[in-house]
Image (spheres, grey):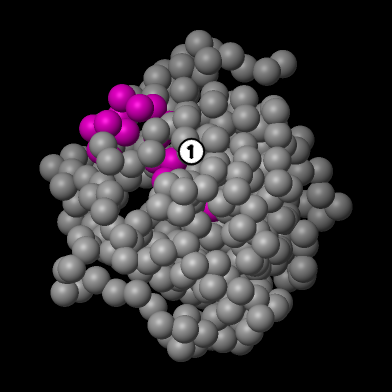
Amino acid sequence: MRIKKKEALELFNEDVLSLGRMADGIRKELHPEPRPGVVTFVVDRNINYTNVCVNGCRFCAFYRTPGHPEGYVLSKEELGRKIEETIAQGGTQILLQGGLNPDLDFDFYTGMLRWIKNTFPSINVHGFSPPEVCYFAERADLTIRETLYELKAAGLDSIPGGGAEILSDRVREAISPKKIKSSDWLKVMREAHRLGMRTTATMMFGSLDDSKDIIEHLDVIRNLQDTTGGFTAFIPWSFQPGNTALSHLKPATAIDYLRVLSISRIYLDNIQNIQASWVTQGLKMAQVALRFGANDFGSTMIEENVVASAGVSYTVSKEDIIKAIKGAGFSPAQRDTTYNILKFF
């Protein structure tokens, strides 16, 4: 039976090990694999094509303001080198995201996509979070649907769930007042799903949010999934305050992370996959997460800049991930963006 918001709130008072057992049971029901306990991962690279951004989010240590000496835009040569290195390591996907750069017009983005697809036709471009899409649309005087249609035609395959943070406008107003509203984030995802594009959903918790905000976030994600079925996975991760305007906040604990992860698995009964976040939690905690509802280890992230800029930097190889999954008692499998298994290990 589907859990309701009030019941989900009460789970924050439950013993975390009990929550883990509940979430692990749901994972097993959703993934009755021919092999016991298959845990998937994708080989990819995060490519941030620019760090220049006008949003100025208080939780972000990565962005630079327009005109800042440390601001950059990747050249095609740099972009191509990064993609070549990814493919050479067995990568099937690039996560392409950047800041909201006022010096780049819409032709820059469609041109970049066409160049990538013409040069590297095998790579899946998982790119442009909802805040970027809304920014493109506003500056090009297009609707969200028209913008997504043009991006898809140029070579965009799927959309990451970045920019969601917490889908509570009370919190968003406090940590990122210039960023799009919750309804805008949901609208981008809804229109993408209607165009046949698959997307992921994320949640950054542990800044100025509370348990009610977290459940509200999960609820709107579940409601949209009921309507469209377009989310492939959900990825909760904890806010990293280092080097940000919110550095005075205490980071969420490992127990906090496991609690939210478990509740996410319990509540999101219509999303098949939940990712562990080794990027923010480290490899050992990601292993533990596999018994608290997660069935996916995320990606190898050959390159990651945003979380690293907050002073949290875990680097792992494909072999590290395979070893970690086996060490936790599961069978590792490499997947593609839409969770088709490519290879068992």
Q: Is 69 placed above or below 60 here?
A: below
Pointer 1 local density, CA inside 10 Å: few below 14, some 14–19, many at least 20: many
Q: Secondary structure at mark 1?
A: helix
Residue 152 % position (x, y):
65, 59
The x and y percentages for residue 169 are 35, 27
Quarter of the N terminus within the rendering = top right
Q: At x 41% / y 64%, what residue is drawn?
A: 105
Q: Is residue 161 magenta?
A: yes
Residue 313, visible in the rendered structure: no
Q: Residue at x 62, y 25 (%)?
A: 223
Q: Quick check: can you spot residue 98?
A: yes
Left or right, 16 with respect to 267, comes to left
Stretch of the chain drawn in magenta: 160-176
Q: In the depicted view, which residue is nearer to us: 8 or 38?
A: 8
Looking at the image, the residue that sits furthest to the top is: 6
Q: Residue furthest right?
A: 34
Could you say where residue 53 lies in the image, as x and y percent from the top left? Answer: 29, 58
* Residue picked out by circle 1: 185
Is 180 part of what is drawn in magenta? no
